[in-house]
Image: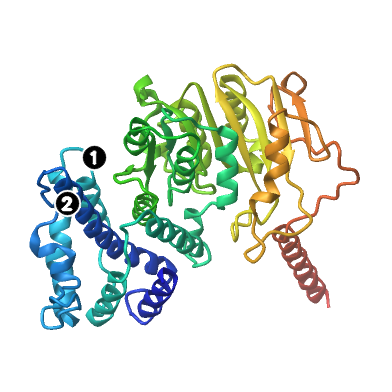
Amino acid sequence: MFEQTFKNIDDILHKDAGCGSELDYVEQTSWILFLKYLDDFEKDKKTAAELTGKTYTPLISTEYRWESWAVPKGKDNKIDHHRALTGDDLKDFVDQKLFPYLKKFKADAVSADTIVYKIGEIFSELKNRIQSGYNLREVLNRIDELRFRSHIEKHEMSHLYEDKIKNMGNAGRNGGEYYTPRPLIKTIVKIVAPTIGNKIYDGAVGSAGFLVEAFEYLKTSKTLTTKDADILQKKTFYGKEKKSLAYIIGIMNMILHGIEAPNIVHTNTLAENLADIQEKDRYDIILANPPFGGKERVEVQQNFPIKTGETAFLFLQHFIKLLKAGGKAGVVIKNTFLSNTDNASISLRKLLLESTNLHTVLDLPGGTFTGAGVKTIVLFFEKGAPTQKVWFYQLNLARNLGKTNPLNEKDLEEFVALQKTKANSENSWTIDVADIDLTTCDLFVKNPHKKDETVLRSPEEIIKEMKALDKESAEILKVIEGLL
């Protein structure tokens, strides 16, 4: 039922002039889903309070509750079309009354880690893009069919929401930034192996995939006590996100997976000066796939000892600094990090090797990130002792990865098994840091077990050379014509 409802909603939004892509569909579905979730959340809280003889005071006042404005119903539990707003009346209510009312929650909240604050922040960050009040009425009716009351319902909904986020990667603009393949995330979480009581952080949270998968991993890691469950809810998962849409999606994703008031802050992580970070600000576990290829302003670069415009390199400095002594990290980065010859890359590799134990590098094949067009690696490191040996694993698959043939957990089974003992194999090897050139700290090493490895040029390099040859030919022709 959920899947068909989502498809129907996308079909409605596709007709609306205010929604132009899958990104818009997810954003608009998210805020309405959130309000429906909030309605069910309040009903559950009220029922729980009544069972213990207590009184529950609703967060949302009567006029703005789902049952009052979204889908008012009669005694027969069917929609009351006389009271249900539609067309311009509905759009005006949402834009001019509902959103301004919900924005005020941010100022009224006692702290940032409450659901009240999250309500205010979400509705401060977005707007209703659905231009037709008639389309909005149809969407509200569809979402009212959904239920968030039972564990099974929430579980199914969370998986469908994940699918919607995944589809954003193929929707143009920068949707791909929000989605890291879940098999890869699950594998990274397995290797880092957090435990209950660890503080887990992602400073480039996106759709919160790393935090969600860490939550799922910890939920099944042992039989949870009431104290364990409370720690997971309130004192385990932390994130920061710069972009408004990703922030909203990340919060919604965590809520659907069972975290009531996610500790995600809407801020530019890189605006924080590393010199200001204290011990209390540090984390036990860092899991992240920071955006790469971005360029940060000079004033942002001033927050870091190693100056560079490359966003991912600034994030890596941030993660190294924020990791507690003995803390563990799994971070996705471009594979060129291993061998770039610019000063920032060399300095950053030296910092990583000297201040952490970079014990494992997972080399991923092209196509792991659908549409990204870059090769990536995963760095696994622990804060404290310097690196002495690095174990490399090169994921070699018998097929090309892509949208219709994505990475799966089975692909990574050998890596997980061999990583436990850092065993050598056809796909894995170890280097001794004492053997590398410490002036460049170049970590790029070809797989010594692969013979006659042919390095193919990228299509971009070939096209660039073709254009250069065309230009050269045109200049020669001009010279010849001038001589005739």
Does 338 appear above or below 78?
A: above
Q: Quadrant of residue 2?
A: bottom left
**Discs 1, 2 touching: Cβ within 8 Å:** no
> Looking at the image, which residue sits at the far right?
452
Instruction: Please report whichever mark, 1 or 2, sits nearer to the chain's N-terminal start.
Output: 2
Q: Residues within 10 Å of mark 1 (few under 14, many from 20)?
A: some
Q: What residue do we see at 86% from left, 38% from top?
A: 449
Residue at numbered disc 1: 112
Where residue 17 appears, as percent x and y from the top left, is 33, 79
Q: Amino acid at mark 1?
A: Ala
Label ID, residue 2: none
Q: What residue do we see at 44% from left, 41% from top?
A: 215
Q: What residue do we see at 76% from left, 26% from top?
A: 431
Decide if residue 372 is in sight here. yes
Q: How far, Cα to Cα, is label 1 from label 2?
A: 23 Å
Where residue 367 appears, as percent x and y from the top left, is 66, 57
Does 390 appear above or below 477?
A: above
Where residue 387 appears, as percent x and y from the top left, is 65, 21
Does 165 appear above or below 121?
A: below
Where residue 423 appears, as percent x and y from the top left, is 77, 30
Q: What residue do we see at 30% from left, 46% from top?
A: 260
Residue at numbered disc 2: 46
| Side (left or right) of 209 relative to 299 | right
